[in-house]
Image (cartoon, rainbow, N blue to C red):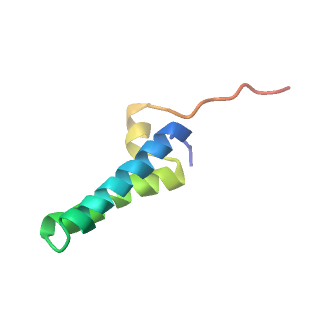
């Protein structure tokens, strides 16, 4: 699998997942919106953990810095 998510992008995704979890279970806890936000938080968390975003692959985006090859 090709990693296309850089370190800063991962941090932003983890932060977004945290905010969605907080909103889902803290602010809107027990409602359908809260459950939906909690489930939706799984997507940025998984893409940050794995380091691959399928949407980025489809669009040809790569935020991971490429280090020069040493010979």
Q: Nearer the viewer, residue 67 or 57?
A: 67
Q: Does residue 27 appear anywhere in the picture? A: yes
Left or right, 8 with reference to 58: right
Q: Nearer the viewer, residue 9 or 22?
A: 22
Q: Nearer the viewer, residue 56 or 49?
A: 49
Q: Residue 53, position in %: x, y? A: 44, 45
In the picture shown, does residue 35 fall above or below 17? below
For the point 59% across and 30% down, which residue is it? 65
Image quadrant where residue 43 sits: bottom left
In the picture shown, does residue 42 fall above or below 56? below
Image quadrant where residue 69 sits: top right
In the picture shown, does residue 8 fall above or below 45? above
Q: Residue furthest bottom?
A: 30
For the point 14% across and 69% down, which residue is it? 32
Q: Residue furthest front?
A: 27
Q: Residue 30, position in %: x, y? A: 17, 74
Q: Residue 26, position in %: x, y? A: 25, 66
Left or right, 28 with reference to 51: left
Left or right, 15 with reference to 66: left
């Amino acid at each position: 699998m090709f990693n296309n998510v850089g370190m800063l992008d991962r941090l932003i995704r983890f932060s977004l997942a945290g905010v969605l979890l907080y909103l889902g279970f803290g602010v809107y806890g027990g409602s359908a919106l809260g459950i939906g936000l909690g489930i939706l938080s799984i997507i940025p968390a998984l893409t940050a953990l794995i380091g691959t975003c399928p949407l980025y692959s489809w669009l040809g985006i790569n935020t991971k810095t490429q280090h020069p090859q040493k010979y």
